[in-house]
Image (tube, grey):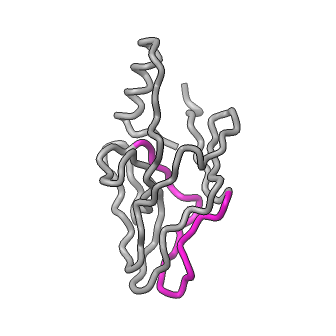
Amino acid sequence: MPLDPAEAAKIAAAAIGGSAYQGPSSWYLELTSDVPDAGTPGTPVDYTGYEGPVEVAAADWEADGAGKLTGKIAIDFGEPTDGSDTAVAVEAYDDAQMTNRIWYEELDAPLDIDDGLDAVEFPIGGLSVTFGSSSV
């Protein structure tokens, strides 16, 4: 999962400066209809009933000790009541106004959203993010 360049810079500065990195107390998750990249945020999905960004407290994630975080709660983006869209990625911000993106990740499979769904939700354990890089 790529960190936003600004967030990666904060962590790097803390690592070489000997100070602790303090992450946000909550992440605000946004589903996007296109895949974001380091320079461009994704486009939020658009359907009636969407409740993004959704706040998820830091305490609502379980760490495996190897860089993987898994949601300990169901993460509900609301019941679609009209319209349709396809979510292909999720982004995390440190505030509801989405001014500072922390990370972004493409979903394993696109999520088709229409008014026939009861809810757009990741069940407990259904959303995991992994920090780290396979390249050095």
Q: Residue at x 37, y 45 (%)?
A: 101
**Which residue is nearer to you in this view: 9 or 52?**
52
Q: Which residue: 41% across, 78% down?
A: 49
Tell me which corner region of the image, top left, top right, bottom left or bottom right, holds residue 96: bottom left
Residue at horizontal 46 percent and vertical 67 percent from the top: 87
User: Residue 5 at x, y = what percent?
Assistant: 37, 35
Q: Main secondary structure of the magenta part?
A: strand
Q: Depth check: 82 or 25 in front?
A: 25
Q: Is residue 108 magenta?
A: yes
Q: Position of residue 43 (x, y in %)?
A: 34, 62
The furthest residue to the right: 64
Locate the C terminus and report the quarter of the image it occupies: top right
Q: Is residue 117 left or right of residue 84?
A: right
In the picture shown, does residue 106 fall above or below 11? below
Camera-nearest residue between 129 and 135: 129
- Relative placement, left or right, of 3 versus 60 is left
Q: Position of residue 70 (x, y in %)?
A: 64, 49
Residue range highlighted in magenta = 102-124
Number of numbered discs visible in the structure rendering = 0
Vertical relation: 1 (above or below) 8: below
Indicate the position of residue 24 as horizontal and vertical percent values: 44, 39
- The structure residue drawn at horizontal position 41% and vertical position 64%, both measured from the top left corner, is 52
Magenta stretch encompasses residue 60: no
Q: Is residue 55 left or right of residue 6?
A: right
Above or below — where is 120 with respect to 130?
A: below
